[in-house]
Image: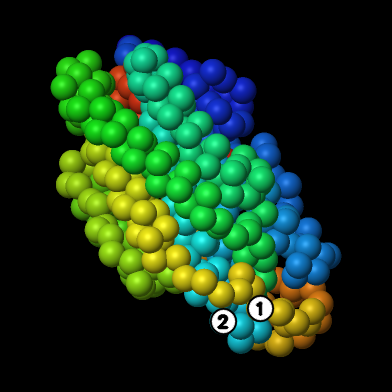
Amino acid sequence: MSRITIPIGPQHPLLKEPLSLVLEATGERIVSASMRIGYVHRGIERLCQRRSYVQNVHLFERVCGICSQVHTTAYCQAVEALSGLEIPPRAAYIRVLMCELERIHSHLLWLGVLAEAIGFTTIFMYAWRDREIILDLMEELSGGRVSHSANIIGGVRIGVSSEQVRLLEAQLATFAEQMEFFRELLDRDRSFHRRTQNVGYMSLEMVHSCGVVGPTARASGCTVDMRQAAPYAAYPSLAFEVISASGGDVWSRAQVRLMEIMQSLSICNQVIKALPGGPLAVDAPRRVPPGEVVTRCEAPRGELVYYVRSDGSERPARIKVRTPTLPMLMVLSHLLPGLEIADVATVVAGADLCIACADR
């Protein structure tokens, strides 16, 4: 039987961001897969060397529109470590609150994209409807739905008033009830099971060899979460569970993310109840002492790494970002061969790719 070539992208209804996938199939079975990235490369790592440390907070917030908060958190933590700064406890708690709200909205966005790829339009509508609750809360706290500008070097620029605390408590309680509905709906839907179980299987060995991180790795039995493995901000003071599964398929990835949303809701409620008083930030120097540092944060898609090197001037000498999507892009070429063509959309959507992060 002859092979056929199936090009997908860089612009395609399956892809929410530009990515070129070239599949070769024999009949209905994929036999090889290759990809090309770089369509949204913006040269951010080079641009940051021409700007001051303060200006770069806004630059790195624009690496990704979905996880802008965690990017600035990782960057600010790196600069603060080089400068010997310790942020106020109130700022540490607010950073955690914003990061967990961001994680919830990212996981719901992913659930909607996956449901749409499968053809489960009802879940897509419900997930994105409820995601608006979280986006509205983040807008209430920071004034922005996409770029929140919450972090500054030395702390945060936003406070949380008593009125906002009451709003958060009410909205998060409503949201928790809706998440139980999602879990019950997906658990009993046989079509969703058939389209996701034993599809896109990734072994724990493949996770380790390819460097896959985040919920995708934890769905294959990995138990690493930077919030516990290398705790930062206020996470050492908060109680939560690292969610993992052993199935390694798209179904397990969905279950891990749904359970992570529940954990994030618990963390948000803990932050609200334990939010300390005090200042929001400390003064930061214009010049950062010479040195280099690596910081790690748990982004919605996994471990986010920032390397910052200072030469003692007002601008960084070098900044390198390692995003969680890049190893997942590499492992896709191993996941797709052997699948039926109809399952490609499920596996690609289930990978939770962020091309803007990977390309930068």
Query: Which residue lies at the image location 60% right of the left edge and 42% below the top edge?
Result: 139
User: Where's residue 351, x and y in %?
Assistant: 40, 38
Element on which disc 2 rests: loop
Residue 342 drawn above or below residue 147: above
Residue beneath label 1, please?
A: 282
How far from the left and from the top, in percent, is residue 205?
A: 25, 54
Q: How is the image coloured?
A: rainbow
Residue 200, by quadrant, is: top left
Residue 141 seen in the current view:
yes
- In this rendered view, identify the residue nearer to me: 267 or 8: 267
Mark sitting earlier along the chain (2/1)? 2
Q: Which residue is mark 2?
A: 86
Quarter that holds the N terminus: top left
Residue 153 position by quadrant: bottom right
- Which residue type does callout 2 highlight? Glu
Residue 46 x/y as whole percent: 76, 60
Q: At x 55% / y 68%, what residue is drawn? A: 91
Query: Which residue does the image show at 20% across and 47% down from the upper left?
Result: 245
Residue drawn at point x = 35 percent, y = 21 percent? 123
